[in-house]
Image (cartoon, helix red, strand yellow):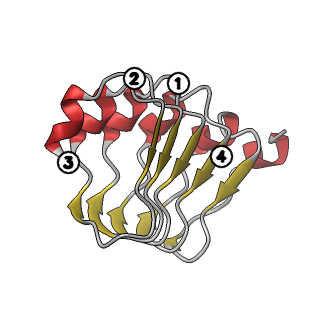
Amino acid sequence: MEQFRQLLVLERIILSDNFLSGELPRVIGNISSIGLLDLFNNRLSGKVPESLEDLSRIRQLYPHRNQLSGEIPTKLGSCRNLNKLDLSYNMLTGRIPENISGIVKIFLNLLNNFLQGPLHTCFSKMY
């Protein structure tokens, strides 16, 4: 996936339903023009890279049905254009970051992970 570094003008990356494995590279955050990143149903592992915060135009992020682990980065709260976020069916742990509720406007799916802790009252204000 290091080749993505040269693909800085992409608007959509759809790699769903493959056998991709390994960690998501940090350089994916360099593709600032991307609006859709679909990595559904692969074998990706490791942490969700904090460099995703650099995807200022990202509207839809679908890394569900992989083997991602660790906590949901609070830096995802910087993605102000994010409408749909699906992190379901991974192995994510920890608390749901409070700032996620302020950015995801249409669809948030965190189903079937290992998340814990209280739900923040800010989720009642999701629009």
Which numbered disc, 3 or 1, marks the residue closer to the eye?
3
Residue type at the position of mark 1: Arg
Asked if residue 53 lies left or right of residue 79, the reply is: left
Q: Which residue is mark 3?
A: 1
Residue type at the position of mark 4: Lys
Q: Which residue is mark 1?
A: 57
Asked if residue 30 lies left or right of residue 41, the reply is: left
Chain-order first, disc 3 or disc 1: 3
Chain-order first, disc 3 or disc 2: 3
Picture quarter with the C terminus: top right
Crowd tier of the residue under label 2, counting other residues whose Cα lies within 10 Å: few below 14, some 14–19, many 20 or above: some
Q: Which mark is residue 84?
A: 4
Chain-order first, disc 4 or disc 2: 2
Question: What distance separates the C-alpha of mark 3 from that of mark 4?
Answer: 23 Å
Q: Which residue sits at x=74%, y=42%?
A: 122
Question: What distance separates the C-alpha of mark 3 from that of mark 1?
Answer: 20 Å
Disc 2 secondary structure class: loop
